[in-house]
Image: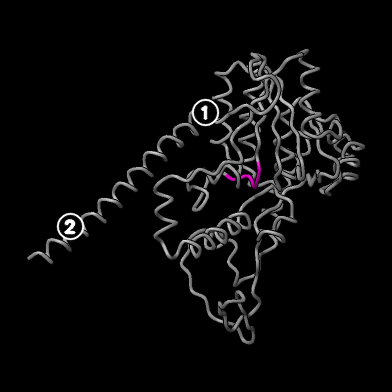
Amino acid sequence: MRIFFNTFFKVLAILSAISVFIVILIAINLKFTKQSYNNNFDFYSGNVESNELIALINLKGPIISDPIGIYKLGNIGRTSSIYPSLIKKYLQELKTKKIKGIIISIDSPGGSVSATNNIYNIIENFKKNNKIPIYFHSKNLLASGAYWISLSADKIFANYGTLIGSIGVKGPDWIYYNSPSALSTGLLGTSIESKKGIELFSNTAGESKDLFNPFRAPTNKEVEHLQKIVNSIYIDFINLVSSKRKIETDILINEIGAMIYNSKSAKKHNLIDGEKDINETIRLMEKDLEILNSKIISNNNNVNLINFKSFLKIVFNDNFLEKQSNVKKQFCENFRNQLSVVAISYYTSKC
């Protein structure tokens, strides 16, 4: 009996210790998560006592409609993707802080058309409704959809050597396997062999309902239809750049094209307003606003707070890394299968 009670109390003590540990983790998580969601901006530079506030919003990663998979864990999405609800949250908070001006520092290869246009409209409407000047800045990459978003700014600046441009639209990929005989998936990816072909049976109703079927070639009508969709969005993109940057559409289409430019070439083509690092951009905004003693606040973009549920998944789920890899595959597949304004280099380096 004594052995039983000794064992019982030892197990009870261990379980109690684990319970206390979990309670502490929950308390810490609730405290920091609440702080993170209610106060995303901290002191960055300048006079900490000043009431002349300028906000610096750091954004990094591809532009998506909503976080998926690993991007939903805690606040990890903040440093890995850009999406409309995140921008709304930042701007709504800044609206309550009596901000004099906003600088958005963005490094992004672009992303989906719908998310890009949505974010552009969010920033454009915020600027008009609140009469707050907004400058954009990039340290490394301001391409495609990211450049589209930056057109909502009053001025655009970039570090020396930043890659800028890629004013174009990418349609979904249609990969056609011509008479495949075998498909296999291994460690090195998908392997396809082709001899006499394999039979495919699918039930669809409506012409071209099986669009992007990899086992049949597209018809001329389908190719032309898809091209019209891409061209329509491209014209909208071109007209927006022309209107905002005062560049003739003929020059955009025939000279600038969808190429990537360095900061010097981008300035020459009037795609940006100049080469400046982030501190120089801040000082310029202070000068334009006639502020002598400002306080710069910045979002907690470098802090990755993981909520308790995410913590348990990471610690106790052996398949976490495998799931993370699958999420990346899904993420890249989504970009391949939708209309996007994203730099092609993103596919080769990340997907």
- Is residue 284 within the magenta segment? no
Quick one: 7 or 206, which is closer to the camera?
A: 7
Q: Which residue is rendered at x = 66% and y = 36% of the image? A: 58
**Which mark, by number, is residue 251?**
none
Earlier residue among tags 2 and 1: 2
> Which of the 4 image quadrants contains residue 96?
top right
Figure quadrant of the C terminus: bottom right
- Position of residue 296 relative to residue 160, above or below, is above
Question: What x and y, as percent, mark residue 158?
Answer: 81, 37
Residue where numbered disc 1 is placed: 39
**Which mark, by number, is residue 9?**
2
The magenta-colored residue range is: 60-64
Question: What x and y, as percent, mark residue 41?
Answer: 58, 29
- Position of residue 179 relative to residue 157, above or below, is below
Q: Residues within 10 Å of mark 2 (few under 14, many from 20)?
A: few
> Which of the 4 image quadrants contains residue 136?
top right
Figure quadrant of the N terminus: bottom left
Residue closest to the far left: 1
Quick one: SS at disc 2? helix
Q: Amino acid at mark 2?
A: Phe
Q: Amino acid at mark 1?
A: Asn
Quick one: 18 or 51, which is closer to the camera?
A: 18
- Is residue 63 within the magenta segment? yes
Q: Which residue is rendered at x = 82% and y = 39% of the image? A: 159
Q: CA distance from mark 2 to mark 1?
A: 44 Å
Quick one: SS at disc 1? loop
Q: Which residue is rendered at x = 86% and y = 32% of the image? A: 274
> Which of the 4 image quadrants contains residue 195?
bottom right
Question: What x and y, as percent, mark residue 128?
Answer: 66, 19
The label nearer to you, 2 versus 1, is 2
Give left or right: position of 291 versus 193: right
